[in-house]
Amino acid sequence: MTDALKTSVMALDGGGTRCRLALSGVAGVTAVETGSANISTDLDGAVQQVTDGLARLSEVTGHAVEVLVTCPIYIGIAGVTGPVIADRFAAALPFHRARVTDDRPTALNGALGGSDGLIAHCGTGSFFAAQLEGQSRFAGGWGAILGDPASAQWVGRRALSCTLEEVDLLREASGLGAHLLNRFGGSAEIVAFAASATPADFGRVAPDVTEFAATGDPLAVDILNAAGRELSSTLHKMGWVAGLPLCLTGGIAPQFLPYLPPAMQEACISPKGTPLDGAIILAHEFAQEVRDDDH
């Protein structure tokens, strides 16, 4: 390792929308972005995203990949369901010293820092986290098949499902439903799309829902109201009480703010930082552990 990188660390935040890889040191933070990654659904693809990110970071910083991988790295990435898959992923990467967790600790640390509060993270997937009196608690993040309520994929999938109910005359026709039928070419095409769609594919339908909700479309508003109920119920179960700060993080989460109870709306604060910022904080803590062990 060069002298310039002796105290440097690397950090990665990866999820269904994108991966961000950063080098943090005395010269500041340099970050690059690659595509989506989930190690449960496509471990090899996630490895490739990290490999691509390393190559880009090498170009931007001027440090060879072989040098960058000697820096301690903290990786928070979607799809980590336990230590076995985390170890498999770490073993497939070229880093000398890596700690791999799911993406929940990075989001929590980035949003709240060391303060008490809760987060509802809704991107392509979703999860919830609380930091209360120095203790962290997490819920959700189990993926599109078994969980991820109020995520972008959940919103998109629900919109398509409800559109098919409109076709069956089980719901009143809506502008959103008509738009989606036109976008996909009909009900049969929606079914064909859903048969092979990834969570990210469903998530790309969500902006249509939020746009139509802004016009008062009844189907779109109904879907976002349902998302708000999911968030409110889970946050209360996680320990939220009036007055505790609450962050809505992830691409679609801020869209749910008007659909939360008034007390929750009043408690919402802007995140202090991003999940990548959280990963950098945890990377420096991990690096200190490494240095302590070396001595």
Image (cartoon, rainbow, N blue to C red):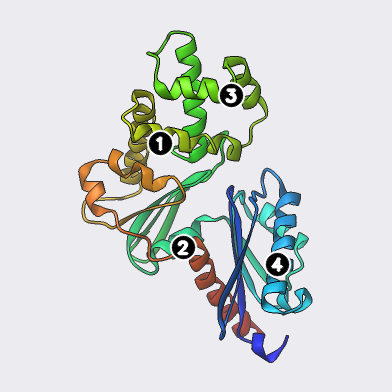
- Which residue carries the number 2 mark? 274
What whole-number distance in Å separates the C-alpha atoms at marks 1 and 3?
Answer: 17 Å
Where residue 273 appears, as percent x and y from the top left, is: 42, 65
Mark 1 or 3, nearer chain start: 3
Mark 4 or 3, nearer chain start: 4
Vertical placement of 16 versus 33: above or below?
Answer: above
Mark 4 or 1, nearer chain start: 4
Which amino acid type is marked by label 1?
Answer: Glu
Which mark is on residue 30?
A: none
- Which residue carries the number 4 mark? 56
Vertical placement of 218 versus 230: above or below?
Answer: above
Mark 4 or 2, nearer chain start: 4
Q: Quadrant of residue 203?
A: top right
Q: Quadrant of residue 27?
A: bottom right
Q: Say which of 259 and 61 sits in front.
A: 61
**On the rendered structure, is 134 left or right of 91?**
left
Image quadrant occupied by the C terminus: bottom right
**On the rendered structure, is 250 left or right of 287?**
left
Mark 2 or 3, nearer chain start: 3
What whole-number distance in Å separates the C-alpha atoms at marks 2 and 3?
Answer: 34 Å
Look at 56% across and 34% down and name the residue there: 202
| Residue 280 seen in render | yes
Which marked residue is nearer to the observer: mark 4 or mark 1?
A: 1
Could you tell me which secondary element the residue under label 3 belongs to?
helix
- Which residue carries the number 3 mark? 184
Could you tell me which secondary element the residue under label 2 belongs to?
loop
Where residue 185 appears, as percent x and y from the top left, is: 59, 20
What whole-number distance in Å separates the C-alpha atoms at marks 2 and 1?
Answer: 25 Å
**On the rendered structure, is 181 left or right of 109?**
right
Residue farthest to the bottom, as pictured? 3
Which amino acid type is marked by label 3?
Answer: Phe
